[in-house]
Amino acid sequence: MTTAPLHVRADDATVLADGPTSLITLLGDAGETGGALTANRATLHTGSPGAPPHLHTRAAETFFVLDGVLDVLVADEIRTLRRGDFLLVPAHTPHAFAPARGESADVLVVFTPGIDRFDYYRLLERVYRGEADPAEIAASGQRYDNQYVDSPVWRDRP
């Protein structure tokens, strides 16, 4: 349970680059929200690969599209979300996301209950910068509740 309000001003938020076409703005991690939620903003420019197929065992992941067009894999179906659309992906459900082909997407991403993920995002940035081995991402799956899965539907999307 949170004991104090969490207020993150846009100018004070940490912004990480996890690739040349993707930014993650850190808003509130589980430790800051009393475990209530974890929230970040994903800014995915045209051509961003987004997040590969994965699932979480301890949290649901929600997407609220602030702007642009986002493709989201949910189990074996790809859903296209547009500005103002909301989607909740329950725990244990394979999913992936990226901007639709030729589009960009700006998305509020929230995990409930909160799971400490900000160090995972920092790891992604270190890998992108060549400061960490990509194998560390797979090795961190249990800690950050990321279980990567294969999805022919996502791999073969148009």
Image (cartoon, grey):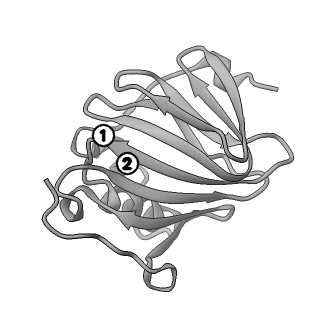
Quadrant hosting residue 99: top right
Q: Is residue 128 above or below residue 35?
A: below
Q: Is residue 125 above or below residue 38?
A: below
Quadrant hosting residue 153: top right
Q: Is residue 6 left or right of residue 125?
A: left
Amino acid type assigned to the residue bearing label 1 in the image: Gly
Q: Is residue 59 left or right of residue 101?
A: left
| Residue for badge 2 | 137
Tell me the number on the disc at residue 141: 1
Mark 1 touches mark 2? (CB < 8 Å): yes
Residue at (47% x, 39% y) in the render: 62
Residue at (79% x, 54% y) in the render: 46
Tell me the number on the disc at residue 42: none
Amino acid type assigned to the residue bearing label 2 in the image: Ile
Cα separation, mark 1 vs mark 2, equals 7 Å
User: In terms of secondary structure, where does tag 1 sit?
Assistant: helix
Query: Residue 44, position in %: x, y?
Result: 67, 56
Q: In what quadrant of the picture does the C terminus appear? A: top right
User: In terms of secondary structure, where does tag 2 sit?
Assistant: helix
Residue at (24% x, 55% y) in the render: 30
Report the front residue among 152 and 35: 35
Residue at the right extreme, as displayed = 102
Report the front residue among 152 and 116: 116
Query: Residue 32, position in %: x, y?
Result: 22, 65
Query: Residue 83, position in %: x, y?
Result: 72, 47
Report the front residue among 115 and 55: 115
